[in-house]
Amino acid sequence: MTSVERGRGRYAPSPSGDLHLGNLRTGLIAWACARKAGLGFVMRMEDLDERCRLEHVETQLRDLSEIGIDWDGHVLFQSDRVDAYGEVVSRLRERDLLYECYCTRADMKDAPRAPHAPPGSYPGTCRHLSETERRHGRDKLSTMRRGPALRLKADVATLTVTDRLCGEFTGYVDDFVVQRGDGAYAYNLVAVVDDHHQGVSQIVRGDDLLDSTPRQVYLQQLLGYETPEYIHVPLVLNSAGKRLAKRDGAVTLDELHREGWSTGEVFSLISQSLGIHSGTSAEFLEQFSLDLIGREPWIFDPLARKSRSEE
């Protein structure tokens, strides 16, 4: 059986900026998990956001390749698949699984929620409106030059999923958006549709996305898709315990190069965060095991970085 027949892993960054160490580390783990399991590995650019730029696509792919990550076939661009998302939305509408939502951000902020519902979840305000109320909702949004969003009618409140690192996780499933009021398709929809399209059977990503997994698995079930294996890995944080960001200084490959780091040294730094001592992706893959990925985040200390650059 070939790796393609067994399934695929994937990495799917958004080209809205250069990849930082945390992104590169997650990409390397995703690649290693797939290759170690004998799976294929595909690359996808989640480029539907208006902040995405072609120059970031080029630098991201260059940086991933530079640290030794390879992928099978062509890179998939979500901007090329808008018609496919539209077809899925049409099928959901035909099954009466969607409804129009006229809520603004202010409406959402003030809306009452169930006692145990997490912040930001949708309370179903527009789910059972009369036709007159819907007409008023469309009129309200037309003055704002936008249309209604489309939300999925969820018939469960929670769903339990299994993650290789996190174990069983029960998360909230609300009537989440599948298409925004400006016509753009939402992340939960496009990620599920694209993973199915690319034959993805293993998803490795940051554990900040664990909360969204029950929603995506629920949508997979509605669409008749198989659920992939999920592996949510800890993020990279700065010395203050916050998510790594450009304000922390040199955190991208280009920035570290300018501070005197070679690609091999950056690769070794990422490897050592997992307890692996290697200078190439081949050496990394030989030593890699899921058991090396703990549940604690990797703290990337800017002071330690500065000390290294001044040696």
Image (tube, rainbow, N blue to C red):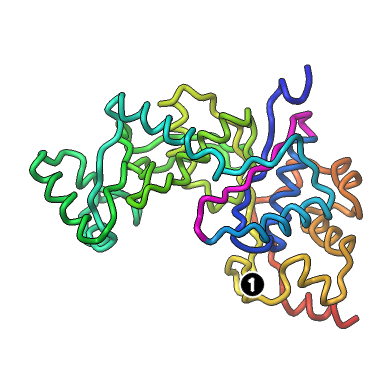
At label 1, the amino acid type is: Lys
**Element under label 1?**
helix
Please state the extent of the stretch shown in magenta in the rendering.
Answer: 36-50
Q: Is residue 46 located in the magenta-colored stretch of the structure?
A: yes
Pick the front one: 265 or 70: 70
Left or right: 158, with 115 as reference point:
right
Residue at image position (91%, 55%) is 279
**In the displayed image of the protein, which residue is found farthest to the top?**
1
Quadrant of residue 222 within the rendered picture? top left
Pick the front one: 280 or 93: 93
Dot 1, crowdedness within 10 Å: few (<14), some or many (≥20)? Answer: few
Residue at image position (91%, 81%) is 311
Left or right: 193, with 112 as reference point:
right
Where's residue 13, x and y in %? 63, 51
Where's residue 104, x and y in %? 26, 58
For mark 1, what is the residue?
A: 246
The relative height of residue 224 versus residue 296 in the rendered view (above or below) is above
The relative height of residue 287 versus residue 6 in the rendered view (above or below) is below
Pick the front one: 141 or 302: 141
Residue at image position (49%, 40%) is 82
Where's residue 92, x and y in %? 35, 29
Left or right: 124, with 257 as reference point:
left
